[in-house]
Image (cartoon, grey):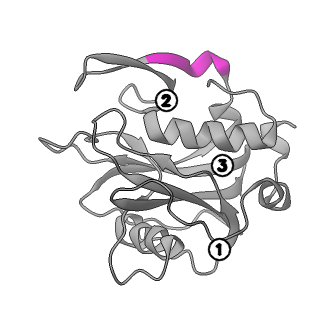
Amino acid sequence: MLPTSVDADQLAAVLDQQTPEYVIDGPRASVAATLRQGSDGPELLFIQRAAKNGDPWSGQMAFPGGRAEAHDADSFATAERETQEEVGLDLSPARRLGSLSELDGGRATNRLVAVQAHCYWLDGPAPQLSANYEVADTLWVPLRVLADRDRYIEYHYPVSDSHFPGIQLDKDTQVIWGLTLRFLSDLFGRLGIPFII
């Protein structure tokens, strides 16, 4: 399958359809991997987190999302609330496609966080986004770009002076790596598309 040929039904067919239960014991979070049909094929919404002293995720590329709150009905509600808060995107009209495998979101920082990723499909033109103070930038990235092996790099993470696989986007400061890259690897693996890891 080519990244440019993927549609909502194909995505839903390979994703987990049951409401997932948290398996990892630790603080809980969830993110929204939101897709739409762009001019260059299907594309995913990413945020670049705002730079903040003392924040190990400062400036990193991610899907919108965050920590669960007691009033969230489930992990979908967490992802949807956080997406609304961070980028002003209401996912209630979007199609819920399913979920990826739960991951430990704190490996690079030794801070255990159980993170679930839920996939959504938006029809129509790209929505107007309104980033809050936690978000420095928002961008839609075609799956074709994410599958481009010429963009695969070794990313240097200065907090631990370590190197990790990464995908270099158009701006030097925008590299997809870590948890977000692992979620992408799960997604591309389910679709049978060769990927960086």
- Can the viewer see residue 46 in this picture? yes
Queried whether the magenta region covers residue 151, the answer comes back as yes
Q: Nearer the viewer, mark 2 or mark 1?
A: 1
Say which element carries label 2. Answer: loop
Work out which quarter of the rendered image holds the N terminus and state it: top right
Query: Magenta residues, as a range?
Result: 149-154
| Amino acid residing under circle 2 | Asp
CA gap, disc 2 and disc 1: 28 Å
| Amino acid residing under circle 3 | Glu
Queried whether the magenta region covers residue 169, the answer comes back as no
Residue, disc 2: 170
Q: Which of 126 and 163 is in front in this view?
A: 163
- Can the viewer see residue 122 in this picture? no
* Residue under the image location 36 percent in, 84 percent down: 71
Rate crowding at label 3 as few (under 14), some (14 to 19) or many (20 or more) other CA atoms within 10 Å.
many
Residue, disc 1: 94
34 is higher (above) or lower (below) than 170 = below
| Amino acid residing under circle 1 | Ala
Residue, disc 3: 43
List x then y, in percent, for residue 20.
Answer: 60, 66
